[in-house]
Amino acid sequence: MFATDQTREGMNAVLAGENRSFRGKLLFAGPAIIASVAYMDPGNYATNIQAGAGYGYRLLWVVLFANLIAMLFQALSARLGIVTGKNLAELCRDNFSSPVVWIMWFVSEIAAMATDLAEFLGGAIGLALLFEMPLMAGMGVTAIVTYGILLFERHGFRPMELIIGAMVGVIGLCYLVEVLIAPIAWGEAAVGMVTPELADATALTIAIGIIGATVMPHAIYLHSGLTQTRAEIRNEQERRKILKYSNTEVIIALAIAGMVNMAMVMMASAAFHLGHEEVAEIETAYHTLTPLLGGAAAAAFLVSLIASGISSSVVGTMAGQMIMQGFLHFRIPVWLRRLVTMVPAFAVVAWGVNTTQALVISQVILSIALPVPMIALIIFTSRRDIMGPYATGPVIRTLALVGAMAVLTLNFVLLAETFGLPVPFLVG
């Protein structure tokens, strides 16, 4: 526990005004970095490749929009944990009726399985391609590595934060390499970021997948738990300081995650959109990158995918534990949680399902499950009996409601399109 205890002592010194250095303030970084991994998971790779290859830079606005929603809701989740000392699932259990709690838990567990499907498959695909091993072997290695990392959690929060932070750094560096290598049309990318457009039903499905892959239900639950007991708060002045540091970390960590996602779309657009629009799978993208952009770009792509899959799978398991403990006041061993959430991924591979398509569908499932924690978070953070003076004001509450309504509307449109009902604003 040395690293964690040392971190807490350092945070106390900063809060007491004894340490005003930048290095001291870095001790408060961690929760948003862990949460940000959920915004760079392999599901993002699948949806972003399809977005860039099929539609060029025209869906970048979706990535930007999703990232802004993510910043808002992760900041609210962190605030909830810091102010109440409880996580979102615990507050749901305390304030909602038993049937509602059970339904919310069930939906959240389905979302957790969909999350792990994307994360686990992504890491396995990356290992299988990089080391030329069978996909099942890649899945086995991913399982062993993720479980090994999860064992560090018993040593406190800081070792896990440092491990996940290092993997985030690897992902970011890999996509910096990709952006420098790929011939990106920066002007077109800038236009795509600010021009809302959905060309057809497929673009709609990919857009909802991007939102599901970017604004993650389990990350909203997890962030409140990561902040609830991390720092010792002795007075309201210290609470306000921690909230300030938390908001700053959320903005920085989620901005980096957003830039990585935009880099994914831009790389896919630059490499595949003209002449290789059919590229829609991670494996095809890797094999196509080598002749188009060279071995360095292809290798960076796989290394980032492996780091993404392993780190996000670890974070997904942590979130699953917190969700079950919060809703049901029940906790299972990490190895059993890891085993249960791995089963769908192994089943998908055993049945021969297209892995990238499975990743995209998993992200759509996440998007449909997303309103559950979003609405609960809006309710709790706006209640003065729970948040006191830290309850959200009308501006933040309105922005959160607009974000939640946007997700609900896109989900409704997806269902309407699935059942063949007309969708008036789809053009092209």
Image: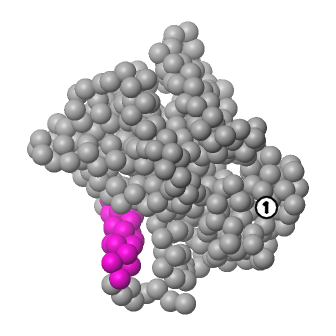
Q: Is residue 396 left or right of residue 193?
A: left
Q: Is residue 248 visible?
A: no
Q: Residue at x 53, y 75 (%)?
A: 203
Q: Which residues are magenta?
A: 397-420
Q: Name the residue at the top extreme.
A: 2
Q: Residue at x 48, y 70 (%)?
A: 205
| Horizontal and vertical percent position of residue 340 | 39, 34
| Horizontal and vertical percent position of residue 423 | 38, 85
Q: Secondary structure at mark 1?
A: helix
The amino acid sitting under disc 1 is Thr
Residue under label 1: 288
Taking depth in this image into account, of 217 and 282 the one nearest to the observer is: 282
Taking depth in this image into account, of 36 and 137 the one nearest to the observer is: 137
Q: Is residue 279 visible?
A: yes
* Mark 1 crowd level (few <14, some 14–19, many ≥20, 10 Å Cα): some
The image shows residue 209, relative to residue 248, as above or below, that is: below
Q: Residue at x 41, y 55 (%)?
A: 366
Q: Residue at x 86, y 49 (%)?
A: 296
Taking depth in this image into account, of 118 and 217 the one nearest to the observer is: 118
Residue 113 colored in magenta in the image: no
Residue 419 colored in magenta in the image: yes
